[in-house]
């Protein structure tokens, strides 16, 4: 599926901030001609004649022939490169000005600006990686936890490809056997009997179901669990957010109603990535701005999967406000009741939970004093156990999950048709539908608009 292009693309592959090293990448069949026009090794030999993947010291000249940087360069000839094309990398000093001028020099020498994800797109189109590996690249770049990084690295190494390829090949064997018997009745081919493939379909179903069910964990791993910190005014919500983050993100005062709007940050708690939203204290108020914040708090609670419901054991009782709190958490899948200020109230009474509602855990802590935070981590970890899927075999995006779900449905329909004694051609129709879906997963068959959508997530230079 090689599509190696003479169109040379170039981009800065590192960030836009000042750093020690900045990398500029090139790819395309004419890369060697472009690099030889701008980079001159110290040994006097053209860069294109140096061995692949060897760092070479030299001078990078700008458009006017002036030395822009003394830097390193490395090349790779097709097909033994990231993109499957001729590639080069300039490792410059990390000045944004140097990198910008290096790009302009390369453009003048015949390269053009790479689009978002264009390097990885070329790698996919040239058969250097399948689509699940390509998607893993951006997941690895965006990983916010070690678990997410390890899973993305496993996908980049082909974990999903290997697992689904085995299923695909088994389904191909079934289809090939059926069509061989049908098309060549006079040949000495083993008769086709559906019963001999019962175990094959059962194993395919089990593998696909495990993959599909991993998406719940993968979604949390990549985007975080939507979590609301809820409570009455001055219950310690902003203090808890600041303590979990490790810095003063939210303003904390003794004045009720200080928090007027929602604040959302990501933090790892108990090995689980939480998308934490601090909210305004729930209470009736005539103050217009605070009232808007309270309504946003209620909306955040409605959308949250997990609610940390903070209760100040020393606060005066207010039955209406307490009922409003419990009403606000009705739709949450999980609720952890947090009794705050344990440094002031070391033995608080557990709250009375209204009938029909639940709490997954009731813990006591003092965020200000740093006491009891381990209890919160343990409670969160208990709600979202890591599971047993090997690294790289946790699906992390909706496209993958939808396709695996379709393949699973098709295999299950094939199994049911087999059990019902329906003719082999009906079973094969479902098996081939599963094969078609798996082809979309890895990129064997894919529409151009879907490809565009996938690579639009990428940053320039990758």
Image (cartoon, rainbow, N blue to C red):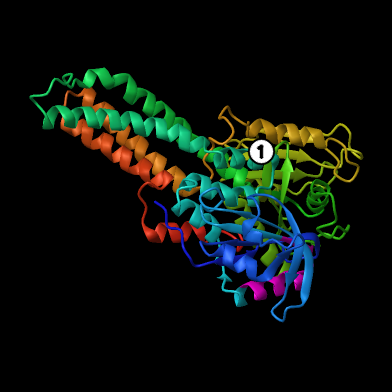
Stretch of the chain drawn in magenta: 91-106
Residue 391's place in the image compared with 260, above or below, is above
Q: Please name whichever residue, 253 or 367, is drawn nearer the observer in this view of the structure.
A: 367
In the figure, is residue 36 to the left or right of 96?
left
x, y (%) of residue 194? 21, 22
The image quarter containing residue 414 is top left
Q: Please name whichever residue, 39 or 383, is drawn nearer the observer in this view of the structure.
A: 39
Q: Please name whichever residue, 145 or 245, is drawn nearer the observer in this view of the structure.
A: 145
x, y (%) of residue 69? 78, 68
Residue 81's place in the image compared with 40, above or below, is above
Q: Please name whichever residue, 144 or 420, is drawn nearer the observer in this view of the structure.
A: 144
Q: Per the image, is 104 magenta? A: yes
Residue lying at the far front in this picture: please name it: 44
Residue lying at the far bottom in this picture: please name it: 64
Give the labeled residue for mark 1. Answer: 147
Q: Per the image, is 335 magenta? A: no
Residue drawn at (17%, 29%), measured in percent from left and top? 180
The quarter of the image holding the C terminus is bottom right
In the figure, is residue 348 to the left or right of 60?
right
Residue drawn at (18%, 22%), measured in percent from left and top? 192
């Amino acid at each position: 599926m090689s599509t190696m292009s003479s169109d040379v693309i170039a981009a800065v592959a590192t960030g836009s901030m000042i750093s020690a090293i900045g990398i500029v990448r090139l790819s395309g069949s004419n890369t060697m001609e472009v690099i030889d026009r701008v980079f001159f090794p110290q040994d006097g030999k053209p860069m294109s004649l140096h061995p692949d993947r060897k760092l070479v010291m030299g001078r990078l000249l700008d458009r006017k022939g002036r030395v822009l940087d003394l830097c390193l360069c490395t090349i790779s000839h097709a097909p033994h490169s990231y993109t499957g094309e001729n590639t080069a990398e300039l490792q410059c000093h990390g000045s944004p000005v140097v990198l910008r001028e290096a790009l302009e020099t390369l453009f003048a020498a015949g390269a053009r600006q790479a689009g978002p994800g264009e390097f990885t797109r070329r790698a996919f189109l040239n058969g250097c990686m399948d689509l699940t590996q390509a998607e893993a690249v951006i997941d690895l770049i965006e990983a916010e936890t070690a678990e997410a990084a390890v899973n993305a690295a496993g996908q980049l190494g082909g974990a999903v490809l290997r697992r689904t390829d085995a299923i695909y090949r088994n389904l191909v064997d079934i289809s090939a056997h059926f069509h061989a018997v049908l098309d060549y009745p006079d040949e000495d081919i083993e008769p086709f009997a559906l019963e001999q493939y019962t175990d094959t379909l059962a194993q395919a179903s089990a593998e696909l179901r495990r993959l599909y069910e991993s998406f719940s964990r993968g979604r949390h791993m990549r985007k975080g669990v939507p979590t609301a910190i809820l409570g009455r005014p001055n219950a310690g919500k902003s203090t808890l957010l600041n303590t979990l983050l490790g810095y003063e993100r939210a303003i904390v005062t003794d004045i009720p109603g200080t928090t007027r709007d929602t604040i959302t940050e990501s933090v790892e708690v108990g090995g689980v990535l939480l998308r934490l939203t601090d909210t305004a204290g729930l209470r009736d108020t005539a103050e217009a701005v605070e009232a808007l914040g309270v309504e946003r708090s209620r909306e955040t609670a409605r959308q949250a999967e997990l609610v940390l419901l903070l209760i100040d054991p020393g606060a005066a009782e207010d039955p209406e406000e307490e009922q409003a709190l419990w009403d606000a958490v009705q739709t949450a899948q999980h609720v952890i009741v947090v009794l705050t200020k344990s440094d002031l109230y070391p033995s608080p009474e557990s709250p009375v939970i209204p009938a029909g509602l639940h709490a997954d855990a009731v813990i006591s802590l003092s965020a200000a004093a740093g006491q009891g935070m381990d209890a919160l981590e343990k409670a969160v970890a208990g709600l979202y156990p890591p599971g047993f899927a090997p690294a790289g075999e946790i699906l992390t995006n909706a496209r993958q999950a939808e396709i695996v779900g379709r393949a699973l449905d098709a295999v299950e329909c094939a199994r049911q048709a087999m059990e019902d004694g329906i003719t082999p051609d009906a079973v094969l129709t479902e098996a081939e539908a599963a094969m078609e879906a798996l082809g979309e997963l890895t990129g064997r068959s894919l529409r151009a608009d879907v490809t565009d959508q996938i690579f639009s997530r990428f940053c320039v230079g990758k």
